[in-house]
Image (cartoon, rainbow, N blue to C red):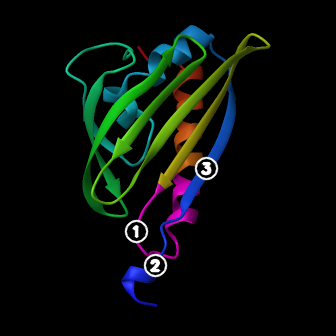
Amino acid sequence: MRAAEQSVRLERISQERFIQAPIDAVYDYVTQPDRWHEWHPTSLSADTGTTGSLPAGTRFTEFIDLLGVRVPMSYRVQIARRPAEFKTVFTSLAVDGSIHYFLLAHQGGTLFKRVLTYETELQMATLHERMIELSAIALDQLKHRLENPPFV
């Protein structure tokens, strides 16, 4: 198949975890991209130009490790509805998409759902499976970090 005939597929990874922590604490932590590197294995660093949760309309940059390649990402916060929902859209030379968080107070803790939607022209057979694996690791690390303070 020639490059011009290759299609770009929209991929979606949806995962959730119950986190034994208050919804406000979870929201405040996950909506600080400059702290994503503390729990997400692909995040190397982010520069938001501020501290705390980001409001809708904010633009920021992040460097990620995409299968061993350092990739600069540009983001814009689309939704910042504390404490229930946060969505950011991203673009880069390698991948475009969105990260959408849904939070629900549940049994004294928080039901946290992360939906990653992305498209890429990279033709790597194992990319999607690896991204599912990394997303699961990220949510497990987030859960552990928030359930074992101090995470401030």
Magenta segment: 119-134
Q: Residues within 10 Å of mark 2 (few under 14, many from 20)?
A: few
Q: Position of residue 1 (x, y in %)?
A: 46, 90
Rendering quarter of residue 103? top right
The amino acid pointed to by label 2 is Gln
Q: Position of residue 27 (x, y in %)?
A: 52, 17
Residue holding disc 1: 121
Residue at 40% x, 89% y is 2
Q: Position of residue 145 (x, y in %)?
A: 51, 27
Q: Residues within 10 Å of mark 1 (few under 14, many from 20)?
A: some
Residue at 39% x, 26% y is 77
First along the sequence among labels 1 and 3: 3
First along the sequence among labels 2 and 1: 2
Q: Position of residue 104 (x, y in %)?
A: 69, 18
Whole-angstrom CA distance, mark 2 to mark 1, is 8 Å
CB-based contact (under 8 Å), mark 2 and mark 1? yes
CB-based contact (under 8 Å), mark 1 and mark 3? no
The amino acid pointed to by label 1 is Glu
Q: Give the mark toward the camera: 1 or 3.
A: 1
Q: Is residue 45 visible?
A: yes
Residue 14 is one of the magenta-drawn residues: no
First along the sequence among labels 3 and 2: 2
| Pick the front one: 81 or 129 | 81
Residue holding disc 2: 6
| Pick the front one: 111 or 21 | 111
Task: Look at the picture and state if 31 lies above or below 83.
Answer: below
Q: Is residue 66 left or right of residue 100?
A: left
Q: Is residue 148 left or right of residue 49?
A: right
Residue at 46% x, 78% y is 6
State the mark number for residue 13: 3
